[in-house]
Image (cartoon, rainbow, N blue to C red):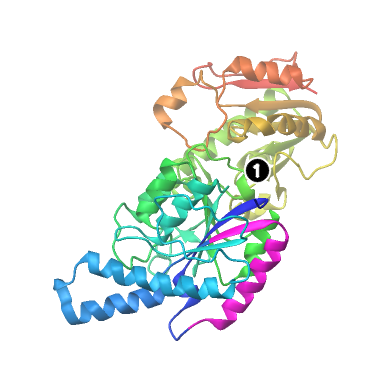
């Protein structure tokens, strides 16, 4: 068996766009796949019907009108996927499984072949759905949907100026975008029925533009790439260095685009800045997970040298100009500052977004750049007020009890600070002020 199994849902419009077969793409795709086969990857490539399928469906509808059934349209599309699949298998004939997979109710013994090519199966199933089934059968880490779009948007960007690109989201929000119905020749970022199955089986799907194979190369290397990552409800917000976006709830975009949320966000940070100034009176503060940098802004108003760092390019890029130069893009696991750079490092509602395996490193990084104190506000199971009024936040992937965090900080050498600090009741928030 190969080192890593990759499922590719290859959009038919990449193979045969309007105007004929895309030979340039196929030449580059051939080189790309073979290069990664040599690195130990095995590819399952499921071919869509694309423009060919839509042309045949439109032709039949033009003759029969309403008399044609979805069943007939689906079969036209399926046969289009099969001719595309045969083309792809022919290109890789020396390293490919010798037959086209066109049934997905069984797991095939494909031996040690480096490339396995699939087509559509039966009416009601898209090739996206087939790719998800293969992902389950062969234990793929993720499914890559190669389409002709760069990223998924909250709305159709051709029609709506306020449409926003989504770098990372969960299946709940994505399904709300694409709906729950399949129709032959449907043009959607990822088939609604396939999305349901991926959600149910906790799979990860990555949507990106297949024409840009350099971008796909970056994804394979773990570098910053352009595209959309969709995953389960307990999705790690740091997966592939993506900005997390769950439709505006509790995250960067909602705070800036909705008046009440921005008003609340502004005054909460104003209050936090006063409390920090009064009870700790630090000279230099770093806010990890700073968002738009409002805490750093208000600290600076109070004479404190306030700085911020956030994983989100989007958030930092939309910060006000008077504070943006004090903000950096970075991750809590590798803060872009030298040792002992600040006498106070704060995190507000950050650690519940950090996977359990990364908590130790996150705590150590905050201690490393602090010379005196670390202040952490963490959502815990005792915070009933937030749970009741705010509902479920699907980006909370590490919610523990207060005691669990106390033991974790103690284990990492953080002792409870002797100075007093104003805290709200435990049912509202859990605060930890620790000394380095």
- Report the label total: 1
Indicate the quadrant where residue 308 lies. Answer: top right
Q: Is residue 224 visible?
A: no
Q: Is residue 377 visible?
A: yes
Q: Residue at x 58, y 32 (%)?
A: 349
Magenta span contains residue 31: yes
Image vertical order of residue 66 relative to residue 418, above or below:
below
Counting other residues with Cα less than 10 Å from the Cα at mark 1, is it few (<14), some (14-19), or many (20 or more)? many
Per the picture, the main secondary structure of the magenta-coloured stretch is helix
Position of the C terminus, as image quadrant, is top right
- Residue beneath label 1, please? 297
Q: For this view, does 240 lie left or right of residue 391?
A: right
Q: Nearer the viewer, residue 427 or 242?
A: 242
Q: Nearer the viewer, residue 94 or 310?
A: 94
Q: Residue at x 61, y 27 (%)?
A: 377
Q: Position of residue 43 (x, y in %)?
A: 59, 59
Magenta span contains residue 2: no
Q: Nearer the viewer, residue 111 or 247?
A: 111
Q: Nearer the viewer, residue 203 or 268?
A: 203
Q: Residue at x 67, y 73 (%)?
A: 31
Indicate the quadrant where residue 333 lies. Answer: top right
């Amino acid at each position: 068996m190969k080192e890593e199994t990759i499922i590719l849902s290859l959009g038919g419009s990449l193979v045969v766009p309007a105007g004929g077969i895309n030979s340039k793409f196929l030449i580059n795709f051939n080189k790309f796949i073979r290069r990664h086969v040599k690195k130990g990857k095995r590819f399952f490539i499921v071919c869509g019907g694309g423009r060919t399928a839509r042309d045949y469906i439109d032709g039949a509808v033009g003759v029969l009108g309403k008399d044609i059934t979805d069943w007939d349209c689906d079969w036209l599309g399926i046969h289009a996927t099969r001719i595309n699949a045969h083309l792809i298998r022919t290109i890789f004939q020396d390293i490919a499984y010798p037959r086209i997979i066109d049934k997905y109710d069984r797991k095939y013994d494909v031996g040690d072949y480096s490339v396995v090519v699939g087509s559509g199966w039966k009416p009601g199933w898209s090739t996206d759905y087939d790719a998800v089934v293969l992902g389950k059968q062969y234990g793929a880490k993720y499914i890559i949907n190669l389409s002709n779009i760069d990223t998924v948007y909250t709305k159709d960007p051709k029609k709506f100026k306020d449409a926003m690109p989504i770098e990372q989201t969960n299946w709940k929000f994505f399904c709300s975008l694409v709906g729950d119905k399949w129709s032959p020749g449907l043009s959607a970022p990822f088939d609604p029925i396939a999305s349901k199955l991926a959600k149910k089986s906790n799979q990860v799907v990555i949507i990106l533009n297949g024409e840009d194979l350099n971008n796909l190369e970056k994804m394979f290397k773990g570098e910053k790439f352009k595209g959309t990552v969709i995953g389960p409800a307990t999705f790690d917000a740091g997966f592939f260095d993506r900005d997390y976006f769950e439709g505006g709830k509790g995250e960067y975009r909602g705070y800036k685009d909705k008046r009440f949320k921005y008003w609340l966000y502004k005054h909460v940070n104003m209050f936090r800045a006063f409390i920090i100034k009064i009870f700790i009176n630090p000279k230099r503060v770093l806010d990890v997970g700073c968002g738009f940098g409002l805490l750093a802004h208000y600290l600076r108003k109070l004479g404190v040298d306030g700085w911020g760092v956030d994983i989100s390019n989007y958030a930092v890029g939309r910060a006000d100009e008077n504070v943006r130069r004090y903000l950096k893009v970075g991750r809590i696991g590798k803060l872009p500052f030298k040792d002992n750079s600040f006498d106070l490092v704060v995190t507000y509602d950050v650690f519940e977004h950090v996977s359990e395996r990364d908590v130790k490193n996150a705590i150590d990084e905050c201690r490393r750049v602090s010379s005196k104190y670390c202040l952490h506000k963490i959502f815990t199971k005792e915070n009933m007020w937030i749970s009741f009024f705010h509902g479920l936040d699907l980006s909370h992937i590490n919610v523990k009890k207060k005691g669990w965090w106390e033991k974790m900080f103690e284990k990492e050498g953080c002792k409870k600070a002797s100075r007093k600090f104003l805290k709200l009741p435990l049912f509202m928030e859990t605060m930890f002020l620790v000394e380095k």
